[in-house]
């Protein structure tokens, strides 16, 4: 399968942000009743979305599914498990925070410049983001 590059990955992330942020904000408002910790609840729900959805939906988030890309493990090309996604999101997030965002910039450059399009969080978790084989067949026939 073909590795997904910088722009398609950014597009999927933006779609996730747009499509998921409104329902998450709504659920946070319901859960908190409009109290001051609404942002914390939204952050927790967002983290759970990015952690759990790829595990239960075969490597997809809503944005990735729309864009025809998915996360998979490099070693056996299987869908990511919970430990893989924890490494990808939590450990990488800590590293990005500790580097004051420099790690995010380096990751973006890695996706844009490396042949395999893998970023820091892909290396930490042993994952890659690839175009879905069904989508690849559709694109070749059009």
Image (tube, rainbow, N blue to C red):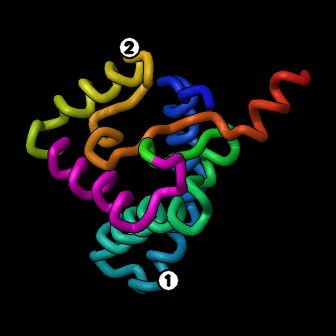
Rendered-image quadrant of the C terminus: top right
Residue sitting at x 42%, y 45%? 75
Mark nearest the camera among 1 and 2 is 2
Location of residue 68 in the rendering, given as x and y in whole percent from the top left corner = 68, 39
Q: Residue at x 33, y 22 (%)?
A: 110
Q: Residue 30 has which mark?
A: 1
Magenta-span inclusion, residue 68? no
Residue visible at 19% across and 35% down in the picture? 101
The image shows residue 51 at horizontal and vertical percentages of 42, 63
Residue 136 lies in quadrant: top right
Identify which residue is drawn at 29% across, 70% down: 40
Measured Cα–Cα span from mark 1 to mark 2: 43 Å
1 or 2: tag closer to the N-terminus: 1
Q: Dot 2 lies on which element?
A: helix
Magenta: main secondary structure: helix
Apparent side of residue 101 relative to residue 9 in the rendered image (left or right): left
Which residue position holds label 2?
A: 113
- Up-down: is 64 above or below 41? above
- Tell me the magenta residue range: 76-96
User: Front-most of 85 and 43?
Assistant: 85
Question: Is 49 placed above or below 78 here?
Answer: below
Secondary structure beneath dot 1 equals helix
**Quarter placement of the N terminus:** top right
Q: Nearer the viewer, residue 66 or 31?
A: 66
How far across and how far down the image is residue 97, in percent? 15, 45
Is 106 left or right of 8, judged from the image as shown? left
């Amino acid at each position: 399968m073909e590795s997904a590059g910088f722009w398609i990955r950014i597009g999927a992330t933006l779609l996730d942000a747009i499509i998921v942020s409104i329902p998450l904000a709504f659920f946070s408002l319901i859960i908190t009743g409009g109290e001051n910790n609404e942002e914390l609840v939204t952050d927790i729900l967002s983290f759970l979305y990015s952690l759990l959805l790829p595990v239960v939906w075969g490597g997809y988030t809503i944005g990735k599914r729309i864009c025809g890309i998915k996360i998979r493990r490099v070693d056996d090309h299987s869908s990511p498990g919970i430990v893989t996604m924890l490494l990808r999101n939590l450990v990488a997030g800590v590293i990005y925070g500790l580097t004051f965002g420099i790690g995010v910039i380096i990751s973006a450059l890695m996706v844009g410049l490396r042949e395999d399009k893998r970023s820091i969080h892909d290396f930490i978790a042993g994952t890659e983001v690839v175009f879905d084989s069904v989508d690849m067949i559709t694109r070749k026939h059009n």
